[in-house]
Image (spheres, rainbow, N blue to C red):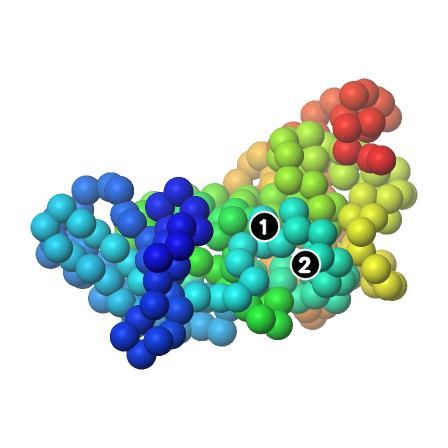
């Protein structure tokens, strides 16, 4: 076996297919664990990593996922060779794929499922650099409406952070990144936040849509955040969206220049 992360390993299945084995550290009674796995195992979507199986031995809880060749989006952005392949077209496709996956979890499964920890590290790229979301539904599967809304709003906010990181290529402080990009965008220089490593043309209409929806996703008043279904429609260009007010991190003077400028912009 080969360690992929703190609690994840690459292994081979009996049919010689590679797989990812994730060790679950939180305690869970066997019956509840099996019930949860039954729900997760019934889920299929093009942009969700497939759950292949599980282990429920005494004292051990493992989930077995399909293995995807190019690893996490986080690792790809740090890998010069792979990052060069993340063109503008591929990055927008990744954003849309992730949005569709989370929308599916929220509205199309037999129970509401929140991801709970949507990060660059939980977006995995296959051999064609298409995105699949991993490690979804590992928190409590809560179908109460109030809890569902809270879980949905967190996923929406996490998606907004992911979009900004993918557009800019920066993976540092989320609040600084949000403020810096918003200040540029509201001043008419949104194009300046795009990752300089992207080769080829950039679709500025797509950039405008992506930035607008990211800032709506990050509104401090979570009631103002869109649903993931609305996010999908905006990214596809079938739903227009108004310019957003400053998101949660953007509370300083929009014309203020500080250390953030030199840290984020080469």
Residue 195 lies left or right of residue 90; in this view the side is: right
- SS category of the residue bearing label 1: helix
Q: Which residue does the image show at 64% across and 40% down from the upper left?
A: 171
* Quarter of the figure that contains the N terminus: bottom left
Residue 109 visible in the shown view: no
Q: Residue at x 58, y 49 (%)?
A: 74
Name the mark on residue 82.
Answer: 2
Q: Which residue is mark 1?
A: 75
In percent of width and height, residue 69 lies at: 52, 66
Q: Which residue lies at the image location 83% right of the left edge and 60% below the top edge?
A: 199
**How far is mark 2 from mark 1, CA to CA?**
9 Å
The residue sitting at the front extreme is 1
- Snapshot quadrant of residue 161: top right
User: In the rendered image of this protein, does residue 217 appear above or below residue 241?
Assistant: above
In this rendering, the answer to whether 173 lies above or below 166 is above
Q: Quadrant of residue 97?
A: bottom right
How packed mark 2 is, by other alpha carbons closer than 10 Å (few <14, some 14-19, many 20 or more), is some
Residue 119 spot, x, y in % from top left: 52, 47
């Amino acid at each position: 076996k080969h360690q992929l992360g703190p609690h994840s390993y690459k292994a081979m299945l009996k049919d010689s297919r590679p797989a990812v084995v994730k060790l679950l550290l939180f305690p869970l009674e066997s019956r509840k664990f099996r019930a949860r796995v039954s729900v997760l195992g019934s889920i299929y979507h093009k942009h969700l990593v497939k759950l292949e199986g599980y282990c429920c031995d005494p004292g051990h809880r493992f989930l077995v996922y399909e293995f995807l060749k190019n690893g996490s989006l986080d690792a790809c952005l740090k890998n010069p060779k792979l990052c060069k392949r993340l063109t503008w077209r591929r990055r927008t496709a990744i954003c849309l794929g992730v949005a569709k996956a989370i929308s599916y979890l929220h509205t199309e499964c037999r129970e509401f499922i929140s991801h709970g920890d949507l990060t660059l590290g939980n977006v995995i790229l296959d051999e064609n650099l298409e995105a699949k979301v991993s490690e979804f539904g590992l928190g409590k599967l809560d179908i109460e409406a109030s809890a569902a809304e809270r879980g949905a709003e967190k996923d929406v906010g996490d998606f907004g952070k992911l979009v900004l990181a993918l557009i800019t290529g920066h993976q540092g402080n989320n609040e600084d990144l949000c403020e810096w990009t918003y200040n540029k965008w509201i001043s008419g220089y949104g194009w300046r936040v795009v990752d300089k490593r992207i080769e080829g043309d950039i679709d500025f209409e797509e950039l405008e849509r992506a930035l607008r929806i990211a800032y709506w996703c990050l509104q401090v008043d979570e009631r103002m955040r869109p649903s993931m279904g609305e996010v999908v429609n905006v990214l596809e260009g079938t739903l227009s969206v108004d310019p957003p007010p400053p998101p949660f991190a953007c509370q300083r003077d929009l014309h203020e220049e500080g250390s953030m400028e030199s840290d984020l912009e080469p």
